[in-house]
Amino acid sequence: MNIRILGTGMAGFGAAYRLRQEGVKSDLYMYDKNAYIGGHTATFETNDGFIFDDGPHISFTDDKRIQDLLADNIDHEYETLKATVNNYWKGYWIKHPAQCNLHGLPSDLIVDVISDFVEAKHKTNGHIVNYKEWLYAKFGKTFAETFPMVYGKKYHTVDAENMDIDWLGPRLYQPDLQEVLKGALEPSTPDVHYVDKFRYPTNHGFAHYLDKFTSLAQIKLNHKVTGIDAKERLIHFNNGTTTDYDELISSIPLPELVTNIINDVPENIVEAGKKLACTSCIIVNIGIDRNDFTEAVWSYFYDTDIIFTRLSFPHLMSPNTVPDGCGSIQAEIYFSDKYRPVDRNPEECIKPVIQDLKKCGLLTEDDNILHTSTLFIKYANVIFDLDRQEALKIVHDYLDDIGIRYCGRYGDWGYLWTDEAFKSGENAAQQVLDNKLSTREI
Ligand SMILES: Cc1cc2nc3c(=O)[nH]c(=O)nc-3n(C[C@H](O)[C@H](O)[C@H](O)COP(=O)(O)OP(=O)(O)OC[C@H]3O[C@@H](n4cnc5c(N)ncnc54)[C@H](O)[C@@H]3O)c2cc1C
């Protein structure tokens, strides 16, 4: 029984883990196009002593089983940190979430935010059909238009009226009037962010969590899947090799799978695949010779004239990600093929990022920048635009029909965090087990 897993990210390892846990004895093979494991949870160590993840990663799962599993993987050597988060808007640093921390902002703005908030609370809303309507209903017009709609456009690359609301979960805190009023009057407020505490490996960056998973399967790196013949059950790779399969679990992004990889996909499925939108992200990594420029572990940026959407500070996740006394920054800049195509090389972002770090006061002219580098993430965050639900059902139904199991952030095509991607891989493996164990094929 050949079970093949495509991708060695959290989802791929979730699948391998579940199969091994259930005693699957056959040789398990995992394939990845990259020369390293981990997908988005990979970590890169630079020659000058800085450690950067493939986009900043922290573990904030509240699932005890996953917490324990990851902790065991790194022999319990992890940092536990408080999620200190802030926002930057037109020269003001605002505690997160901004709607409960208006104190110190221009009084005209505060008055408008609060009066719109009260008005919104007294309005009866019909059926809310998009993110813009949701924001108006929950926060009122002024706050919606000043903060989340501007940030959302920077981050998701699409206007709020073209976005669904099925991705929200706990992501946007919904305060009551008392919280808004208190936050406007008082400089200090309770912490209400949905991430309270998080963990990060003490050594070697986030990817360290995955090291022990490599014993779960035989891993074939530098194996980019270029073709899948679902009738003959064959997988073709860019290095000219081919393998067969009885069961296939894929964490490859769905648009790639149905537009470029699977043979003879019907035109309507290809069209649906093309409608699935995702952001791409340029990451600019900066290393500096001091570490006292922020207390926030990450910060959100609302101004459209600031190039980055979010900053993270790896030296605050573990001091071992930087040389002694140094600090580090990861800046995220978002694009998408569908709404804001990438129009520059990642390296071209370094200078504007440094300029904007100075503009908002995080860096000074005197700072000694020890390291700069960039990363490009082709598939970053799934865009929950109004095309997504229908197109996704078409693509998933097709994969179900041809017997390819999908998992992970880009297989489920959702807003999955690392723990959810792992569990999604476990679920895909469970489908294989449910299908095959009873027939004793494994
Ligand atoms: C900027 C950013 C920050 C994030 N921060 C956090 C965070 O702080 N905490 C958190 O929990 N989550 C975070 N996430 C989400 C997290 O990265 C994902 O949930 C998780 O890593 C997804 O794992 P996956 O296995 O589904 O996908 P991936 O990690 O993308 O794995 C898919 C794998 O498939 C491989 N692959 C793709 N195409 C092919 C092909 N043709 N042939 C062979 N292999 C192929 C890829 O190389 C990759 O290894 C963040 C995401 C981003 C983009």
Image (cartoon, helix red, strand yellow):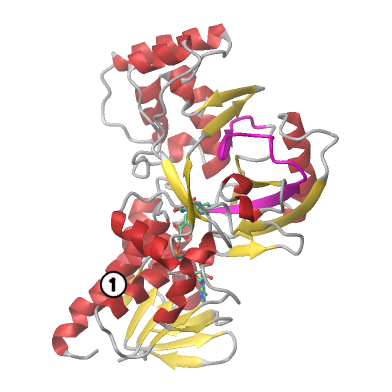
Where 397 falls versus 261 (above or below)? above
Given residues 138 and 52, the one toward you in this image is 52
Q: Is residue 309 left or right of residue 16?
A: right
Percent from the top left, x then y, of residue 433? 22, 78
Percent from the top left, x then y, of residue 343? 70, 51
Q: Which residues are magenta?
A: 278-304
Percent from the top left, x then y, of residue 348? 78, 51
Residue 139: quadrant of the picture: top left
* Residue in the picture at 65% in, 52% down: 283
Question: Can residue 345 be seen from the camera position used here?
Answer: no
* Residue in the picture at 55% in, 42% down: 155
**Is 432 part of what is drawn in magenta?**
no
User: How dense is the environment of label 1, judged by Cα within 10 Å: few (below 14), some, or many (20 and up)?
Assistant: few
Image quadrant containing the N terminus: bottom left
Residue sitting at the far left: 438
Q: Which residue position is annotated with label 1? A: 400
Mark 1: C-beta under 8 Å from nearest atom of ligand 1: no
Q: Is residue 134 left or right of residue 221?
A: left
Given residues 439 and 229, the one toward you in this image is 439
Secondary structure beneath dot 1 equals helix
Percent from the top left, x then y, of residue 170? 35, 38
* Residue in the picture at 76% in, 60% down: 48
* Residue in the picture at 38% in, 37% down: 194
Given residues 430 and 162, the one toward you in this image is 430
Q: Is residue 340 left or right of residue 18?
A: right
Q: In the rendered structure, which amino acid carries the disc numbered 1?
A: Asp
Residue 418: quadrant of the picture: bottom left
Image quadrant containing the C terminus: bottom left
